[in-house]
Image (cartoon, rainbow, N blue to C red):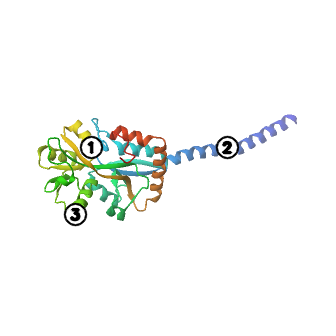
Amino acid sequence: MKKYFVFLLALLLAAVTAACSPKENAGTTEAEAGSGTSSSKAKTIIVGTGTQFPNVCFLDENGKLTGYDVELVREIDKKLPEYNFEFKTMEFSNLLLSLETNKIDFIAHQMEVNEERQEKFLFNKEPYNVFPLHVAVNQKNNDIHSIKDLKGKKAVVSATSNSAVFLEKYNKEHNAGIEIVYSGQGADDTTNQIRTGRADATITTPFAVDFLNEQADAQQKVVGEPLLNSKVYFLLRKDETVLQQRIDEALVELKKEGVVSELSKKWLGADYTVEF
């Protein structure tokens, strides 16, 4: 009888243990699934950029996409686990259309604010650096000292770029008489036109001139005072307000941590997160 009682007690304990086990296992599985689900549910964001902007977005000697804008986006991506950023490279002139047609989700390519872009798109609110535009000419050119000396001269810029937008507006508002021509694909065309004298000047940044002189023997120099110190932002579609807010939050953190300033010094040669 005693043996029979012990047997029944053992069966009862086994039943209780079996009943409890699934709940404990379910809790562990749910926690693991939650961790995995969080990662698997990260939304893929396609970031449009280029490969021809020295020190900003370009291919290094190993063919790796890098530069100030690229590395900053990678740092922002680390701050936002709900997103997975992937780069898509293209010619600068194709970026706005690609954003408009949903082929990319935001642009990282030193975009400054202008009315046309504001009408169609959404800028994030926290600028990530200041874009200083200058006149640049061949090192042997001693006739051009400022933008006022470009009257009757040929200035080459990339279509739809900050430089093009600025120069087109300046030409119209000041009746400046500058002959604006648009470069072909890549920075090489602009460099060659300045080097060979087919164009007299371009509108660019000091850090781009330094890079091209070092890497491509561009034979350029910056002249005159800064034409513009525009704050630059990422450009998104109008409906991406949540992404806009998250990018801004990440940027504020990265600025406080000194990451943005350090990236600017590394890639642009100075802290362009503040106005000069």
Q: CA distance from mark 1 to mark 3?
A: 26 Å
| Element type at mark 3 | helix
Contact (Cβ within 8 Å) of mark 1 with mark 2? no
Please tell me how crowded label 3 is: few (under 14), some (14-19), or many (20+) other residues with Cα within 10 Å: few
Contact (Cβ within 8 Å) of mark 2 with mark 3? no
> Closer to us: mark 1 or mark 2?
1
Q: Say whether residue 147 is visible.
A: yes
| Left or right of residue 87, residue 253 in this image | right
- Which residue in the protein does label 1 denote? 208
Q: Position of residue 203 (x, y in %)?
A: 23, 50
Q: CA distance from mark 2 to mark 3?
A: 74 Å
> Closer to us: mark 2 or mark 3?
3
Residue plotted at (41% across, 51% down): 127
Q: Position of residue 254 (x, y in %)?
A: 46, 44
- Which residue in the protein does label 2 denote? 24
* Kind of residue at badge 3: Lys
Quadrant hosting residue 175: bottom left
- Which residue in the protein does label 3 denote? 172
* Kind of residue at badge 1: Ala
Residue plotted at (22% across, 63% down): 172
* For marks 2 and 3 on the same chain, the one whose residue lies earlier in the sequence: 2
- Relative to the observer, which residue lies in front, 166 or 236? 166
